[in-house]
Image (cartoon, rainbow, N blue to C red):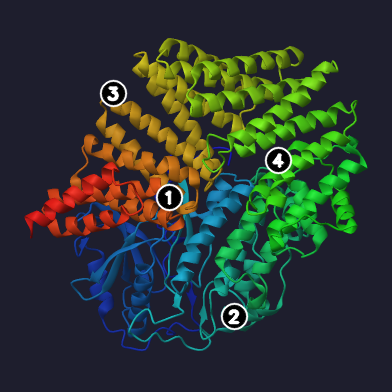
Amino acid sequence: MTQPPSTPPPEPPDDPSSGFNPDDATIPMDSSADGDGDVGSTGAMFASEADAEFIDGYRIIRKLGEGGFGIVYLAQQSTPVKRKVALKIIKPGMDTKAVISRFEAERQALAILDHPGVAKVFNAGTTERGLPYFAMEYVQGVPITTHCDRQRLDIRSRIDLMILVCRAVLHAHQKGIVHRDLKPNNILVEYEGDAVSAKVIDFGIAKSLHQPLTDKTIFTREGQMIGTPEYMSPEQAEMTTQDIDTRSDIYSLGVVLYQILTGSLPFEPETLRSAGFNEIARIIREESPAKPSTRLVDQSSASRERSKVVAVSRETDMRTLTKGLRGDLDWIVMKCLEKERSRRYDSASMLADDLQRYLDDEPVLAGPPSRLYHIRKFARRHRGLLASAGCVLLALVAGIVVSVYYAVHEARQRAIAVTERDQKTAMLAIQVDHSADLSRLLGTLIQRVDALDESASLASLRIEHLESLLEKAQDDDHGLRLQLADAFSTLARSRWTRRNPSFDDWPAASIALSRSDAVLDALDADGVASVEQHLHRARNHMLRGDHARHILRDMPVARASYASALESIGEASAIDPNRVDVRSNHAIVMTSLGGIESREDNASASLERYEQALRIRAALVQESPQDSLLQRDHAVVLVRVASMAGRTGDATRQRELLERSLDIRQELAARHPGQNRQLRDLASGHRAMADAHVDQDRRAEAMDNFIRYIDLLEMLAWLNPSDSRAASIDLSRGQEAIGYLAWCGAEPEMMLRRYERYHDRLLEPRLSYDPDDRSTRSLLVENALKRAELHMQAGRQGDARRVCIEGVEACEGLDDQDPSCTAIRDLASRIEAAGD
């Protein structure tokens, strides 16, 4: 999207199509299809009750919508928690046995689901007049199609959002629940603080695969169409519920995906709605829709004009949009829409994974299985081979491409052995795709080889192939030698980076840096000078400086390395002072130097360095306001300057800069929903703001930002539980943030709930993923200690004992002197000594 919403989305109006959508999807053959009992006179009783100000303790605010047998109200709950809820009550005159059974089934379906992407049920009961109701999460959102078009999301952002939806649907399927009515009105997008999320709602016609959702019998007559025609699967169109499984929802997800990509439905709504039930069923079961890319161009002139509008709402033009849909996205969508369900994706997870493969430019499962297709996809991801490299270089790189690809994706084979035919195929694919960046290709190959760390023969490729390529390079082939210098540098960065503890082989990185420097020195001796050459040398100095600063804690060595980097950047700037990468690297070095000054308590000198970096970043963003990476870098430097402004006593400027940084991060998170990097940046922005409020004793504001920070960490953990960086950095700072909530004035029970959620949503899943992660285990023990202490404060000694036992058990594998283990053992001993 180009702009985030400037204001929160409005509350949905009474029209259910634009907000909470009750059970309007069931389309019976006749008006009495759901009835098997006496309608009675409850209509009049209900009408007077529905008009009441309160229903069983819930204060009615207004009606959100109504469907076939239910009415949904926005209501205010006062006890035990103050919150707005969606209150669903059976419609006037519809409290028949069948309706009550289906109503109970929906409530039960929601009750067994617990996922951030599914609306929650809070409570259930009956009114004074005996009418069933249940209170559920009030989702203040808009249909997914409305959100995508209103925010003018590009195709990648729309797919990001669909992946979130797939994960929510997967959760329901894992619980044995088939939704049976997935459509945009039942997939709402809401703004939770600063993050965009998708919620699946309305399980009014859901089906359980494993056991009945209620002990009451639900009658569904033959000839009753269950679902919404435009989105229902061919098996649903058979008008029987006997043979529906999760793949029916996959079909519906495919229709939604079709719609958010093309702005149209596979079958025209007017055609379906004007047909009889038998004709609707025939169309869905027998006719094949046009592929998404074809649908955009195979239309009347009037429709083509509308397609142009569709393209604009996706931040592109018709030609680019059609080309982008052709191939992978056509295949993915049409696999979802297969008439024979055995040919669809087996699960929502498989669909989400294929969409992610599309985003990552990897071969999709829905695509053709040919070897050429897979190799072409690999080549497109790494547009990296210079035409001047010659046939020997082509053969060498082609051998690596084919070997590593099949080692990783087919058999994780232990040796590199490719046929002449495969080499020629790879060479052809690379030449056709006009690759132009050898270092990126080799860098990715290096990472794929590293993934096979049990294979010494594959690991040896890292340096051997680069050395082989260097030996084959002609002395006057300066372009190839420069690319190889960058490739060695890329290898170094793959062996060590301060941002990921998984890459911590500095000796190997140092060797690779030396090889890179040697190639650059040889180019210098030949009298060659270019911007790229100076930038490669500068980046090598910067990596050495980062290692000295963050690992060795040797500030003089770090300062000297950064100074050398500045010198190289100055030489690059003398050749082309306007190049973005030259200026950007200049800003990076100034930021690093500012960090050294900050560490040495030279606040004014640090501020000066950061200000220089900020001026560069601001100018770059002004020139390219839509460049997300430049915006992100700008936001980072704003926080650095703000920190120093606070340390030098300028609290007003500190707050203003942090707000500007947070605004940028919010915009980027809205533009790229569900992306870990943007969400982590947004979380960091709130943490910086919270810390500033702590320094200024602004407790309410600090609490608000700490809570947003913690909530975003929980979302990150849900999106990627295996993220090692989240485990090493976010987990520790997040639990620290919960501790700050007490200083902010949080009640003990709120603190307890926060620690419990953090345990359940972050620490336990992470430890399950990696039981040997000592840092997470230590945090889990610390978490147990905090929970036990809060239980003791509340007089719940039994709960405190139970939590202490958990914590003591978690101490296994940690040092005996771990402070948290010592503390929780002491607390457990005191509890036992005190007795009940």
Please state the horizontal and vertical placement of residue 271, each as a whole percent of the image.
66, 71
Question: Marks 1 and 3: in contact by CB < 8 Å?
Answer: no
Residue 600's place in the image compared with 220, above or below, is: above
Q: CA distance from mark 2 to mark 3?
A: 62 Å
Q: Secondary structure at mark 2?
A: loop
Please state which amino acid type lies under the numbered disc 3: Gln
Residue identified by numbered label 3: 696
Please state which amino acid type lies under the numbered disc 4: Gly
Residue identified by numbered label 2: 235
Mark 3 nearby-residue class (10 Å; few <14, some 14–19, many ≥20) = few
Residue identified by numbered label 1: 773
The residue shown at (41%, 83%) is: 34
Please state the horizontal and vertical placement of residue 293, each as a whole percent of the image.
74, 57
Q: Earlier in the sequence, mark 3 or mark 1?
A: 3
In this view, the residue in front, 686 or 727, is: 727
Q: Secondary structure at mark 1?
A: loop
Residue identified by numbered label 4: 443
Please state which amino acid type lies under the numbered disc 1: Asp
Of the 4 image quadrants, the one containing the N terminus is top right
Q: Earlier in the sequence, mark 2 or mark 1?
A: 2
The residue shown at (69%, 33%) is: 512
Mark 1 nearby-residue class (10 Å; few <14, some 14–19, many ≥20) = some
